[in-house]
Amino acid sequence: MNVAIIIAGGSGQRMHQDIPKQFLHVDNKPIIIYTLQVFQRHPDIDAIEVVCIDGWHQVLKAYAEQYGIDKLKWITSGGDSAQESIRNGVYNLRDKCSADDIILIHDGIRPMVDETVISDCIEKCKRYGNGVTALPHNEHVFEAKDDISTAQYIPRDKTRCVQTPQAYGYSKLLAAYEEAYRREIGIYGACYANTMMVDLGETLYFAVGSYKNIKITTPDDIELFKALLHSKKDTWLK
């Protein structure tokens, strides 16, 4: 079984709105629903779990019913950080998933993920034990010495920009979270499943990413999402 854990546990403070950003409407539809619809349509996704901010569970259930998201099987509460929210989602599946099930972790505020990205993530996980969506950097990357100056640059061919979805075998993912929280490794600050895995000594394997797979965190991102949503590829482009 392939299960998608959609992380929607944040309050979206950087968006400066009155409701969580995942529930903001774009073209009369909540952002979280755009995300869920992609996983709903994907033939290889068997079930969906949403890790949702407290107070919004019933709202999410109502939207899921309205938009026909019948793969949504479980809703659980988020934590104080993205990492805690992922952990909550993983722990909630203890009696629901088998050891060899594939778990895809995806940000609820990445509504432009496409089916080819999800498919490659699953395929890489089947082949290597995990699959992490990633893109090469097109810009130069510098390590900062302080707020206004550089220490050194990092060659672009040695860097990747990691996105979600990220796919892991369930037994490995569950054991990793149990170990990380027991040893307090890879669980603080902006840590995520991928950084935690590396902190625990795991090798990650890159899956195909997409530059359209943006993360909506600020009002400017809303405008970019609208533009992408209504864009059409020119027929002359290969």
Image: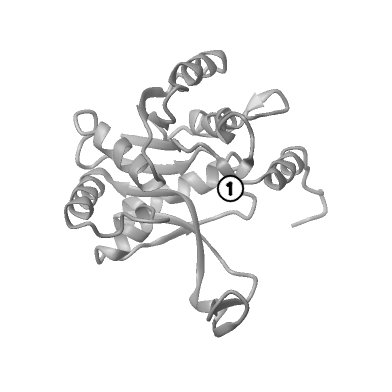
For residue 216, which quarter of the picture? top right
Q: Is 138 rendered above or below residue 235?
A: below
Camera sees residue 38:
yes
Q: Amino acid at mark 1?
A: Lys
Which residue is found at the position 17% from the left and 52% from the top?
182
* Applied colour scheme: one colour
- Measured from the top left, where is residue 189 in percent x and y? 39, 56
Which residue is found at the position 65% from the left and 46% from the top?
218
Q: Is 170 rendered above or below residue 27?
A: below
**Quarter holding the N terminus?**
top left
Left or right, 108 with reference to 223: left
| SS of the residue under disc 1 | loop
Left or right, 4 with reference to 1: right
- Measured from the top left, where is residue 20 in percent x and y? 55, 32
Which residue is found at the position 34% from the left and 55% from the top?
188
Which residue is found at the position 42% from the left and 56% from the top?
190
Q: Disc 1 marks which residue?
A: 215
**Quarter holding the C terminus?**
bottom right
- Measured from the top left, where is residue 219 in percent x and y? 69, 43
Q: Is 176 rendered above or below residue 106?
A: below
